[in-house]
Amino acid sequence: MTKKVAVFPGSFDPITLGHVSIVNRALPLFDEIIIAIGVNTEKKHMFSVEQRKSWIKACFPGNKKIRVDIYEGLTVDYCHAHHANFILRGLRTAADFEFERGIGQINRRLNTSVETVFFLTESHLTPITSSIVRDVIRHGGDISGLVPNQVKIS
């Protein structure tokens, strides 16, 4: 039987409670979930990729079904290289759906063996985005209730 491996790609700058919820809810469906931090040299990140990786690992201590990795390039190419047949994505809004649908359709065109699986965000987590969290941090606000306790900002 083929192992069901999902890649959950993103910048996770920083990881939010919404991200953690998606992973936890998807765990029963997959044999392994690779949380893949995408490196985009054209995008300015608030936190280093190593810091983001450390936070993500701390959110899922000892979970043998979760691996955290860093990658560059096309997500479908990463999936192929790591024998993943699913891409996991979270949807907060209709705008997210439209954006993710287009990416999912192109990914399917590029690699027909990879399916995109969408999870709806839990309603109480819908307003949380990494962009909003970064803005709260920039202005000295309280990020508790937006990110996991493992995300510590000094």
Image (cartoon, rainbow, N blue to C red):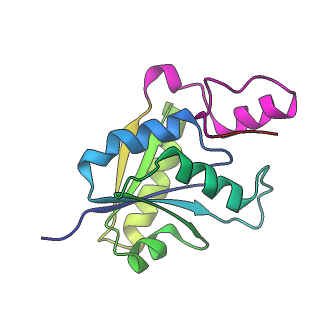
Q: In the displayed structure, would residue 54 be above or below residue 140?
A: below
Q: Is residue 61 left or right of residue 71?
A: left
Q: Give how far across and how far down residue 78 sits, in percent.
A: 48, 73
- Residue 95 placement: quadrant: top right
Q: In the displayed structure, would residue 91 be above or below residue 80?
A: above
Q: Is residue 7 left or right of residue 44?
A: left
**Residue stretch in magenta:** 122-150
Residue plotted at (33% across, 66% down): 114
Q: In the displayed structure, would residue 132 be above or below residue 57?
A: above
Quadrant the C terminus occupies: top right
- Residue 137 placement: quadrant: top right
Residue plotted at (52% across, 44% down): 59
Residue 64 visible within the image: yes
Q: Give how far across and how far down residue 98 sits, in percent.
A: 49, 42
Q: Give how far across and how far down residue 103 sits, in percent.
A: 49, 57
The stretch drawn in magenta includes residue 42: no
33 vs 89, nearest the viewer: 33
Residue 11 visible within the image: no
105 vs 45, nearest the viewer: 45
* Residue extending farthest right: 139
15 vs 40, nearest the viewer: 15
Quadrant the N terminus occupies: bottom left
* Residue extending farthest top: 124
Residue plotted at (75% across, 23% down): 142
- Residue 64 placement: quadrant: bottom left
Residue plotted at (70% across, 65% down): 40
134 vs 54, nearest the viewer: 54
Q: Give how far across and how far down residue 26 sits, in percent.
A: 33, 45
* Residue extending farthest left: 1
* Residue extending farthest bottom: 81
